Amino acid sequence: MMSKVIIKNSAQIEKMRIAGKIAAEVIEMIAPYVKAGVTTQELDDIMLKFIEEDRHAISACLGYHGYPKCTCISVNEVVCHGIPGNHKLHNGDIVNIDVTVIKDGMHGDTSKMFIVGQTSPRNHQLVKVTQEALYAAIRAMGPNRNLVEAGRVIQQIANANNFSVVRDYCGHGIGEGFHEEPQVVHYYPNPYSLILKPGMTFTIEPMLNAGTWKVKINHKDGWTVTTADKQPSAQFEHTILITETGCEVLTLRAEEEETLGRYITCK
Ligand code: MF3
Ligand code: CO
Ligand code: CO
């Protein structure tokens, strides 16, 4: 079958750098507000105002297939697509904030876990291992590498720590479209072989669970995904560009300059 993966040109890549930077800045901006007592709606309001008024960008989520809010905020057993609302954050919660913006026609998509106050050692480990799994997958991406390597390294790190990998949601190509080809699956083995080429842009966004990989959709709101066993889940996400030598992290935050870095030479 012919690949429909879009290779971005240098003008498109420059716009994606800008969109990616804005998405990263939203996460950096909201960090000091993620505290016990705040509602997820209050956080969403602050991020919407920042995206629209400060960065003159658009939330890609708001109105996407009818999604009602600007961001996704997923607490504890919520795997992804948590809808901001009057729910208050509590000490010990682990919280994913997922931001996707459109700037000048291009998308940037990223998410990060926050820990509210003090949490359990197992929750800490889940958050840390999920971030390490994302970083290891990013470091394996480069020209002429196979996309299945992302799932392989993520599954290996999850297994080594007794966590499971969510199978029902995946990363995705991104650009003018929010969700383009290819699908980026985070488990292994998987049949989604694809040789990577410079100019491809996609997200990697592993979701790791403390218990089962199985998930459930909330049929009342049609969006909220929780673990089937109500054990906690963690996720981190970056948008990356395949370069001539490795990859570039388009949604890098300042705090990651030392630990990950923007330009990654494939091992
Ligand atoms: N940002 C999510 C992703 O990483 C998608 C959210 S779609 C929404 O792909 F409609 F739920 F916002
Ligand atoms: Co995404
Ligand atoms: Co996202």
Image (tube, rainbow, N blue to C red):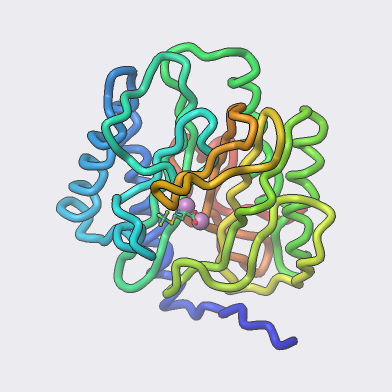
Tag count: 0
Task: Decide which of 58, 65 is in the foreground and name it.
Answer: 65
Residue at 63% from the left image edge and 46% from the top image edge? 206
Question: Does residue 86 lie above or below 178 as drawn?
Answer: above
Residue at 46% from the left image edge and 71% from the top image edge? 175
Task: Say which quarter of the image contains residue 228.
Answer: top right
Q: Position of residue 71 (x, y in %)?
A: 35, 48
Task: Left or right? Give the position of 253 relative to 59.
Answer: right
Q: Position of residue 82 (x, y in %)?
A: 42, 42
Q: Position of residue 6 (x, y in %)?
A: 56, 80
Task: Say which quarter of the image contains residue 190.
Answer: bottom right
Task: Decide which of 125, 163 is in the foreground and name it.
Answer: 163
Question: Does residue 190 lie above or below 136 as drawn?
Answer: below
Task: Left or right? Give the position of 213 relative to 255.
Answer: right
Q: Position of residue 241 (x, y in %)?
A: 56, 64
Residue at 59% from the left image edge and 20% from the top image edge? 124
Residue at 58% from the left image edge and 54% from the top image edge? 263
